[in-house]
Image (cartoon, rainbow, N blue to C red):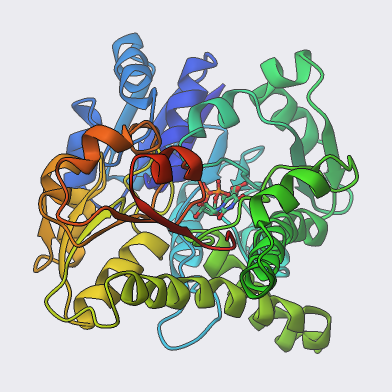
Amino acid sequence: MKISVIGCGYLGVVHATCMTELGHDVVGIDVDPEKIALLAAGTPPFYEPHLPQMLSRALATGRLTFSTDISVVVGSNVHFVAVGTPQMVGSDAVDLRFVNGAVASLLPHLRAGDLVVGKSTVPVGTAQGLSRIIQQKGSGATLAWNPEFLREGFAVKDTLAPDRLVYGLAEGDDTGEAILDEVYARAIAIGTPKVVTNFATAELVKVAANAFLATKISFINAMAEVAEATGADVTQLADAIGHDVRIGRRFLNAGLGFGGGCLPKDIRGFMARAKELGVDQALTFLGEVDQINNRRRERMVDLAREIVGGSLEGKRIAVLGLAFKPDSDDVRDSPALDVALRLVESGAAVIATDPQAVATARRRYPDMTYVTTPDEAAKDADAVLLLTEWQEYRALDPLAFGEIVGTKAILDGRNCLDPGAWRAAGWTYRALGRP
Ligand code: UDX
């Protein structure tokens, strides 16, 4: 099929590349010429495992091109809208500027039979409005909403082999499903579950899934608060309740909580939309979910203060991890970066490192001290804070690492180390929700 992808951010680049891998002819469009030049040269503008290789392969086929010129979408029959929907400045609501702009720029180029496919995460009700705008233009093109569930770090796998497909279609649309089935033919062939529904349900599936995941994480972090007050161990608690198949162990890792470009802004946008719809009471609990999540960051700074003897002023703190999660260079709403900055504000001398996110963190906060390796960060440190559970940090040898630091004190912000091994090597080990 001939496909265009509007928006070459995280979602768009992965989608365009994977669609080429699936055999389609794809053009990726973005308003940022620098990004387009990088992509055309085979360099993704962010870190994502397996993507550079796949992008090079896709470009080599000649079936993937990039452009800043929206008119090159002519000739494509399916137009994916994959632009960002950030949180509005000064409000919890979603900023739809880019989605509206993308659809407006597509309008003059749409032809009869074309399908515009929304992938961006939008407030419920958006697709209905956009569908009307497309209809009014009278080109004969139609709209479908097909939310994306990819996780950073697993984006390629999640796009090529999604765990489900959701198609939101207009009432009476009998061609949208067949077109999307052709786009996703490989996933359909292996029996990927498919839910065909209306626009509102498709839009809600995405925010409901993220709200559920955020709630699961904040639930276990709330249990961590109780565990801290009682001497219980939240990781054992999670293991034990996770054996109940109705609960499940995944997304029950207590620690610094969630961040990134999706979960935090999606739950806030969901609450803002519910308020507009007059059903805000249904989602007030998400405000608690957000607050529990933010409290973990404060608690981490308090623990750091405790472990260095009561004041952070002038203390040398090694920060391991800046990305919001491992296998990503994304520092948007990153709990790790947030804690590092709070430590700086409290007067600590922070030496921070991350295998991939130093450049992205430095772009936002040039004044913090960044180094390349954990050993450099930990040299003569008064305390070490592990804030993102990269594999190379999980694998640190407490004996060898103990030779580098000034004081053997470690805070495990992700409950990913073996407390016994670290304590046996002479470290003071503290974690969130563990005795
Ligand atoms: C999320 C959704 O999972 C994905 O389906 C959606 O499309 C986009 O948003 P992502 O932002 O890549 O994906 O991250 P995810 O793996 O969901 O993790 C989100 C945050 O929760 C991270 O900060 C992670 O560290 C944290 N987390 C996750 C926990 O604190 N505990 C857990 O048990 C799991």
The answer to which of 408 and 284 lies nearer the viewer is 408
Give the image location of residue 177, x and y in percent.
79, 34
**Relative to residue 296, is residue 276 drawn left or right?**
right
Give the image location of residue 307, x and y in percent.
34, 69
Quarter containing the N terminus: top right
Image position of 178 with respect to 293: above or below: above
Instruction: State which quadrant residue 198 falls in.
Output: bottom right
- Residue at image point 71% right, 30% down: 179
**Relative to residue 108, is residue 30 drawn left or right?**
left
Image position of 432 with respect to 380: above or below: below
The answer to which of 348 and 365 lies nearer the viewer is 348
- Residue at image point 79% right, 62% down: 200
**Relative to residue 208, is residue 244 drawn left or right?**
right
Give the image location of residue 356, x and y in percent.
26, 41
Quarter containing the C terminus: bottom right
**Relative to residue 225, is residue 348 drawn left or right?**
left
The answer to which of 324 and 56 lies nearer the viewer is 324
The answer to which of 217 and 142 lies nearer the viewer is 217
Image label count: 0
Q: Is residue 200 visible?
A: yes
- Residue at image point 76% right, 54% down: 205
- Residue at image point 38% right, 36% down: 28
